[in-house]
Image: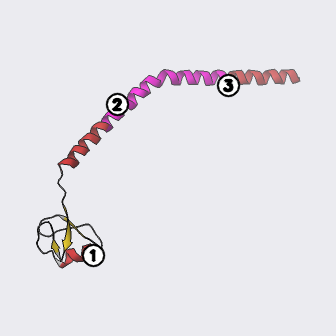
Amino acid sequence: MLSNNLEFKKLLLLHGKDRRKQSMETELENLPHSISHIESKIEVENATIASATQELRNLEIYIAPLEEQKCSGCNLRVSNDVVSSVLVEQKLTHCDQCGRIVYFER
């Protein structure tokens, strides 16, 4: 009976190996399709990144420090609300006059 049990275990092992082998062969056959699918996704992502990069290059963002309650970009006085927002609240704030992002140099 022990030898029958041992042979049964061998058959189970062989069957498991065959199933794994078939699974790996199927996966290997599908690999070229998976690769081409991933490559097409990469191409789309690269196009999106290139487009976004170009848009960012086209944007003109100006930043100017505040000096004595004046925007150093346009040299005009900003409102007390802008000064308070920059100094106290430390928020991203734009100049009332020219729209530049203003900040306080410490």
| Mark 3: amino acid | Gly
| Residue wearing tag 2 | 40
In three-dimensional space, the C-alpha distance between marks 2 and 3, rounded to whole angstroms, equals: 36 Å
| Residue wearing tag 3 | 16
| Foreground residue among 51 and 104 | 104
Residue located at (31% from left, 37% from top): 46
Quadrant of the drawing holding the N terminus: top right
Q: Secondary structure at mark 3?
A: helix
In three-dimensional space, the C-alpha distance between marks 2 and 1, rounded to whole angstroms, equals: 49 Å
| Residue wearing tag 1 | 87
Q: Secondary structure at mark 1?
A: helix
Q: Residues within 10 Å of mark 2 (few under 14, many from 20)?
A: few
Q: Which residues are magenta?
A: 17-45
Q: Residues within 10 Å of mark 3 (few under 14, many from 20)?
A: few
Disc tally is: 3
Name the front one of labels 2 and 3.
Answer: 2
Dominant secondary structure, magenta = helix
| Foreground residue among 22 and 92 | 92
Q: Secondary structure at mark 2?
A: helix
